[in-house]
Amino acid sequence: MFALQERTNDMLSEEQKKVKKILLTPIECTTQETLTVFLYNNRIFSSQKYNGFDPDMSDFAVGFYQVIYKEKLAKLGHNILDEKGNLKVLEKYKEFCGDTMNSYNTIEKRLNDDIKKKLKNKYHCLANFWILPMDVGHSSSWTITRDLGKYSKSKKGIDDYMDKFLEYYLENNEEYSKVYPEYTKSFMLDTFATDHFLKDIYIENNEVTESMKFSYKEVDDIANEMCKRIEKRAELIALEKGTELYKFFLDLGIIQLI
């Protein structure tokens, strides 16, 4: 059971409920070069200044990071992208990049159709996005250097599982801090769970406890656990950043459509 389970949807204000709904709405990237974000057919469509078409690096997601990580991104001028849409570099590496927490690529072929559809409709949403160093979150092991390969989420055995990655990250935080000093200074170990809105959803008392591990279950149960955690994180973000996000969504003209 989640320690956060007692925080039900009934605890949210009407504004926070609207924020939560947007946090759980699937995102697709468009080809527009200028900032465009709109809601259509229960999906959010966003332009992407950053090269490629990754919802977790869409203009909408980048704006979301600016809101929930405002203080953490101060050294970057509160934006992970430069004027040309490239990731900013601090020290040696691109240490701040949007990333999808739970993915289903590893288990997709083994899921039943209903659960597959449920997870697919949830995993590309703001509540499932966070910031990691570029080479940890976005790069596959065969596209980065051998030295950095061991830090990647694609490391064998971690795959798409947040609990396994967090366990590895927390256990090897000292090593990560040597490679990514700015990231680990911004997201220090003692406040990592709070800073990323993971507390009592993925992490308890600064560790991934047995009650938070889900990747050792049956495949359909894993997918259901992923969906539960995405929704719980949406609730927590809405509770803690609801006012700021409501204004952000209002300025984009999408909160009025919820």
Image: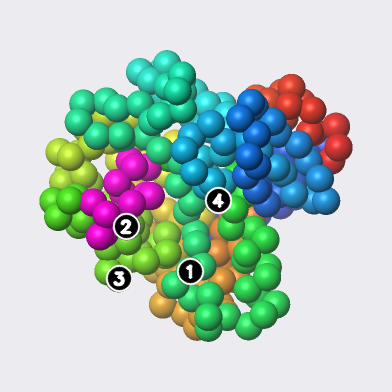
What's the residue at 70%, 42% (across, down)? 45
Q: Is 117 drawn above or below residue 207 in the view shown?
A: below
- Work out which quarter of the rendered image holds the C terminus and state it: top right
CA gap, disc 4 to disc 1? 15 Å
Quarter of the picture holding the N terminus: bottom right
Q: Which stretch is magenta?
A: 132-144
For image coordinates 63% across by 73% down, the residue present is 116
Seen at 27% across and 69% down, the residue is 156
Amino acid type of disc 1? Asn
Residue 6's tag is: none
Tell me whether circle 2 and circle 4 mark residues in contact (CB < 8 Å). Answer: no
> Who is closer to the viewer here, 231 or 135?
135
Residues at circles 2 and 3 in contact by the CB criterion of under 8 Å: no
**Residue 105 numbered tag:** 1
Q: Earlier in the sequence, mark 2 or mark 4?
A: 4
Mark whose residue sits in front, 4 or 1: 1
Residue bearing the label numbered 3: 157
Q: Is residue 211 left or right of residue 254?
A: left
Q: Is residue 124 above or below residue 79?
A: below
Residue at 54% across / 46% down in the picture?
53
Q: CA distance from mark 2 to mark 3?
A: 13 Å
- Disc 3 and disc 1 in contact, CB within 8 angstroms: no
Tell whether 74 sits left or right of 123. left
SS at badge 2: loop
For residue 173, say whether it is visible: yes
> Where residue 145 sits in the image (x, y, percent)?
17, 51
Q: Which residue is mark 4?
A: 128
The residue that disc 2 covers is: 140
